[in-house]
Image: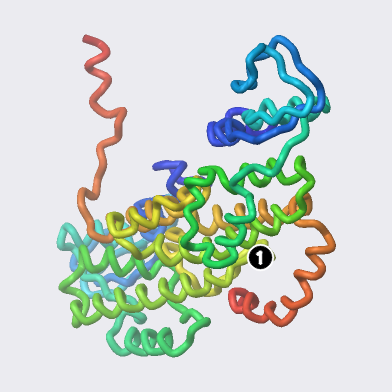
């Protein structure tokens, strides 16, 4: 677990996946539609990814392809990927895709992610270094987490450069200066 | 060596890049008599009035602030030379003109501290700004060709500040492309069929590698 402390990685694993139980499970309240505290074989339940993954390792469930990678999304990405609102589908679209692809044995997810990122990357690139912040905010709302990070990396380095070019205070007081006296008193 | 200011922003802040640029040498004409200065970075001087000598930019700026010298602007900082460079930059979509590695920082420092020593300072200033804009736009158009087969980027003659601006973005983008191109996600058959048509496409990518 290389990303054990990565908060994004943790939230990614909270995404819901629909699974079908292969074994009956008693004494668990994870199926809200069930009247008793047990899950029957063949029932379809939405579980967070981390739980579904663990259960699948024990062959208790089988995972379906999550809703954010359905046919409708794919068609939209093929049509005009730059305008698809991927954030509402899943803010961690790419990371989630990378995690889920090997588990659901769907070989088309990988290429889908790559082609979506490739074309959306261009959109981020053209907006990131030029557009003023408020003007681009509408565009920001459809970006996934990863794309937002990319966008902000470019924005902040450009803003830092502009600030430097405009000038301003040339010297910054080091934070440790002027503290010594206070601690003595 | 890493920058100290903000580890998340980029490796170096603009101020740090400027600090590095202050080690570049410039020619000054002192108007005082002074013995040679012995520093860790080297010995400079002795200084005689009206005798031109080479010193680091930080020393030149310090002397200039005290009114002890005039700074001779570097050769590339003339209207003719810069006009030439600007035209060449506009003509070619791919090639970057050869300018000093720290031209953005040096010009900024000289505009701030030695305006009176630069002939046609307004013209020179707007030319430098134009050149920077044209070059940055070129970097952006070049970056559009970035894709999952690029493991690294090589752009010749890019200056320190220009590299510093795009560094966080390129780093992240390359990382993302690398992640999405992992063999676990892209099946091999698909990769091969994907590769074929891109033999022709390779030429487009090569533009970055000059």
Q: Nearer the viewer, residue B134 or B72?
A: B134
User: Image height check: is B76 above or below A144?
Assistant: below
**Image x and y of residue A31, in percent:** 64, 21
User: In this picture, is B88 found above or below A62?
Assistant: below
- Quadrant where the C terminus of chain B sits is bottom right
Q: Residue at x 35, y 74 (%)?
A: B133
Q: Say above or below: A21 vs B99.
A: above
Residue B171 shows up from this direction = yes
Q: Residue at x 35, y 87 (%)?
A: B81
User: Where's residue B73, x and y in %?
Assistant: 29, 75
Decide: few, some or many residues near mark 1? Use Cα within 10 Å; few <14, some 14-19, many ≥20.
some
Note whether residue B38 is visible.
Answer: no
Which of the two residues, B156 or B37, is positioned nearer the viewer here? B156
Instruction: Chain letter for mark 1, please.
Output: B
The quadrant holding residue A15 is top right
Q: Nearer the viewer, residue A62 or B145?
A: A62
Count how many numbered circles sit on residues in the image.
1
**Which coloring applies here?**
rainbow
Toward the front, the furthest residue is A35
From the top left corner, tell me how far across and down residue B113 is, in percent. Answer: 21, 63
Q: Residue B28, image x and y in percent?
A: 28, 70
Q: Which residue is mark 1?
A: B150
Q: Is residue A152 left or right of residue A37?
A: left
What's the residue at 36%, 81% (across, down)?
B76
Secondary structure beneath disc 1?
loop
Question: Residue at horizontal 76%, vertical 42%?
Answer: A104
């Amino acid at each position: 677990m290389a990303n054990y402390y990565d908060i994004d990685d943790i939230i990614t694993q909270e995404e819901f996946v629909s699974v079908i139980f292969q074994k009956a499970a008693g004494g668990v309240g994870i199926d809200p539609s069930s009247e008793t505290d047990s899950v029957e074989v063949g029932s379809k339940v939405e579980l967070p990814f981390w739980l579904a993954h663990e259960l699948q390792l024990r062959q208790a469930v089988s995972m379906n392809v999550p809703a954010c990678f359905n046919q409708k999304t794919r068609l939209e990405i093929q049509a005009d990927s730059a305008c698809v609102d991927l954030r509402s589908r899943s803010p961690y679209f790419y990371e989630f895709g990378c995690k889920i692809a090997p588990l659901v044995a769907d070989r088309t997810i990988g290429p889908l992610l790559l082609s979506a990122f490739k074309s959306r990357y261009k959109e981020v690139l053209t907006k990131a270094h030029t557009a003023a912040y408020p003007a681009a905010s509408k565009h920001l709302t459809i970006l996934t987490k990863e794309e937002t990070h990319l966008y902000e990396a470019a924005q902040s380095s450009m803003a830092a450069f502009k600030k430097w070019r405009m000038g301003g205070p040339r010297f910054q007081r080091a934070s440790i200066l002027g503290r010594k006296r206070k601690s003595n008193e | 060596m890493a920058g100290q200011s903000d580890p998340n922003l980029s490796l170096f802040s603009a101020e740090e890049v400027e600090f590095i640029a202050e080690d570049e040498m410039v020619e000054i004409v002192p108007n005082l008599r002074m013995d040679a200065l012995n520093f860790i970075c080297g010995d400079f001087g002795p200084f005689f009035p009206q005798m031109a000598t080479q010193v680091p930019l930080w020393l030149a700026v310090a002397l200039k602030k005290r009114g002890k010298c005039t700074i001779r602007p570097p050769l590339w900082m003339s209207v003719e030379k810069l006009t030439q460079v600007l035209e060449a930059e506009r003509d070619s979509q791919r090639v970057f003109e050869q300018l000093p590695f720290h031209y953005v920082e040096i010009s900024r420092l000289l505009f701030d501290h030695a305006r009176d020593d630069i002939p046609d300072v307004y013209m020179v200033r707007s030319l430098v700004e134009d050149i920077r804009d044209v070059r940055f736009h070129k970097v952006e158009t070049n970056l559009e060709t970035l894709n999952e087969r690029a493991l690294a980027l090589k752009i010749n003659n890019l200056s320190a500040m220009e590299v510093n601006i795009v560094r966080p973005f390129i780093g992240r983008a390359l990382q993302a492309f690398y992640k999405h191109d992992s063999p676990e996600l892209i099946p091999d058959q698909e990769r091969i069929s994907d590769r074929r048509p891109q033999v022709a496409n390779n030429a487009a990518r090569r533009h970055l590698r000059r």
